[in-house]
Amino acid sequence: MKKIILYHGTPNKIVTPTFGLGNDKHDYGRGFYLTEDIQLAKEWAVCRPNDKNGWVHKYELDASELKILDFEKYDTLAWLAELMKHRDAADSKRYRMLSQKFIAKYGLDTTEYDVIKGWRANASYFYIAREFVRDNVDIDILEKLLFLGGLGIQYCIKSELAFSKLYEIEDLLLVDYNEFNERYNERDAEARNNMRDLINSDENKVTKVFSTLF
């Protein structure tokens, strides 16, 4: 039996994971998001600029009967296509037209999966997506750009079966806003600076770019 310990960082002391709830505009659409990294969960609990302490809820997921889609096992383009299904990396007619073609070519059918695992597109990761659709990033440096962001990996609980296999462990943790919001902002600022440097370097050939991939 495969059991995974996961953490959910949130401003809320009381959380009830519920099938069918969530935001369609999140990275992998509607669902309940967690991570195996408790330190990242602490940062995500207080990543909003509201000066309020947060909470980390601990869960056990019985994954023995679940179908898990792991984007780390696929090409980076598949992950970007999934983001484009749910989040707008640009607001233009050009992007709307090209993103649909990109999704059709590189996207995966995620409907049969119970759980989706992959990078969390916080501010620094979404910076990559925006620069990519503007034709400013060569696909040869995409994976390296992701590693510069610190690899914030998350799990999205999608199906009713997966929700029935998720159990909260009574180990609620209070997160200090000042300490962990600062860590979150420092991580994001460092990632953006490193990404900018790589994008502006000679390593970025800017030949195999978004609009050339169809």
Image: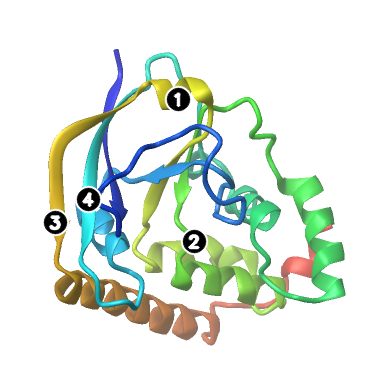
Label 3: few (<14), some (14–19) or many (≥20) C-alpha neighbours in 10 Å: some
Residue 148 falls in which quadrant of the image?
Answer: bottom left
Q: Secondary structure at mark 1?
A: helix
Residue 84: percent from the left, percent from the top? 68, 57
Q: Is the residue 129 above or below the residue 57 in the image?
A: below
Residue under the point 39% across and 67% down: 149
Q: Identify which residue, 163 or 62, lies in the foreground.
A: 163
Kindly identify which residue carries mark 4.
56
Q: What is the CA distance from the residue labelled 1 to the residue labelled 2?
A: 22 Å
Instruction: Kindly identify the amino acid type of the residue bearing the numbered disc 2.
Output: Ala
Instruction: Kindly identify the amino acid type of the residue bearing the numbered disc 3.
Output: Leu
Label 2: few (<14), some (14–19) or many (≥20) C-alpha neighbours in 10 Å: many
Kindly identify which residue carries mark 3.
174
Instruction: Kindly identify the amino acid type of the residue bearing the numbered disc 4.
Output: Val
Q: Residue 162's mark?
A: 1
Q: What is the CA distance from the residue labelled 4 to the residue labelled 3?
A: 7 Å
Query: Disc 1 or 3, which lies upstream in sequence?
Result: 1
Query: Disc 1 or 2, which lies upstream in sequence?
Result: 2
Q: Is residue 47 shown left or right of residue 119? A: left
Foreground: disc 1 or disc 3: 3
Q: Identify which residue, 197 or 176, lies in the foreground.
A: 176
Residue 94: percent from the left, percent from the top? 85, 73
Q: Are marks 4 and 1 in contact (CB under 8 Å)?
A: no
Q: What is the CA distance from the residue labelled 3 to the residue labelled 2?
A: 24 Å
Q: Residue 149's mark?
A: none
Q: Secondary structure at mark 2?
A: loop
Q: Is the residue 45 above or below the residue 19 in the image?
A: below
Q: Is the residue 202 above or below the residue 19 in the image?
A: below
Residue 85: percent from the left, percent from the top? 69, 52
